[in-house]
Image (cartoon, coloured by chain):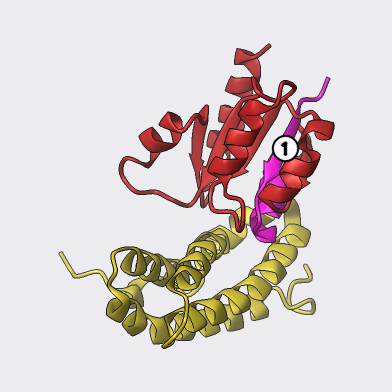
Chain colours: A red, B yellow
Amino acid sequence: MTARVAVVEDNPDNRLLVSAILDGEFEIVEFESGRQAVAQLEAAAPDVVLLDISLPEMDGTEVLAWIRTRPGLASVPVIALTAHAMSGDRERFLAAGFDDYVTKPIVDESLLVGAIRRWLTATD
Amino acid sequence: MAEHTVENDPVVDPTALVRLEALGGETLLREMARLYLENAELRVAQIGRGLAAGGELSDAEAGAHSLKSSAANLGATRVARLANGIERAVQEGEVGVAAELYPALVRAAAGAAAELGRRVNPTAGETP
């Protein structure tokens, strides 16, 4: 069965690039904002969530906090997708409860695909 | 070692375009360029509003943050570096530094737009 990956990202070009990278191996469900994700993520029932940190109105950290309160989603791996790349960011995002962290721009596609595969295997 | 300045960065790095093409063909490249051009115009304007007198600095920061990853996707390295510089400067409270970088960002964005426009022009992209 094809695993379903939710992509929560406000930049349309980043959404398109992520979809192009994941296309063929995963089923992709896209969300343009944190609010849209909160409204529709439970129905989408993803196996992994790729969550941008810098979203307008409701940022990735708030969406993550919400995900962890939902019985159907709480144990789904959530990978932070972010253009923050300052030292200590990785530790900060993992401490905030993200399972993993991938930086933008996505220079090496295999890092993103590898992270998703790893978490799908971990939760099998 | 020679000092690195943004003027040494490519306006558009062709390897980024080759990579997009390898990933999804000319269709992906053109669509990515179209989305980038739309977004860049909005974000450059947003940064300008944010840095103007009476503007919201958080606007400038958010605009620069969005622009830097979009620009990097398309190989607009100079735009990405300047956007990153503006984002950092605003975060560090160096609004004057951010305002000094802004005109260079506007020029770099215009240069990248012109070059990407040429590259993804429908009549120029056909294979012989």
Q: Is residue A48 one of those drawn in magenta?
A: no
Image x and y of residue B70, in percent: 57, 62
For the residue marked with disc 1, what is the amino acid?
A: Ala
Disc 1 on helix, strand or loop?
strand
Q: Is residue A2 one of those drawn in magenta?
A: yes
Classify B118 as above or below A23.
below
Point out the image quarter for the N terminus of chain B: bottom left
Question: Does residue B95 appear in the picture of this structure?
Answer: yes
Judging from the image, mark 1 belongs to the subunit labelled A
| Foreground of the two, A82 or B16 | A82
Q: What residue is drawn where x is 34% and y is 78%?
A: B7
Report the residue marked by disc 1. Answer: A6
Classify A7 as above or below A123.
below
Classify A19 as above or below B99.
above
Displayed quadrant of residue A92 = top left
Question: Does residue B22 appear in the picture of this structure?
Answer: no
Classify B110 as above or below A72.
below
Mark 1 Cα within 10 Å, few/some/many (few <14, many 20+)? many
| Foreground of the two, B1 or B78 | B78
Q: Is residue B60 left or right of residue A76?
A: left
| Foreground of the two, A78 or B9 | A78
| Foreground of the two, B59 or A24 | B59
Image x and y of residue A95, in percent: 41, 30
Q: Is residue A92 left or right of residue B116?
A: left
Q: What residue is drawn where x is 70% and y is 67%?
A: B35
Image x and y of residue B12, in percent: 51, 71
* Magenta-tinted stretch: A1-19
Q: Is residue B42 left or right of residue A31?
A: left
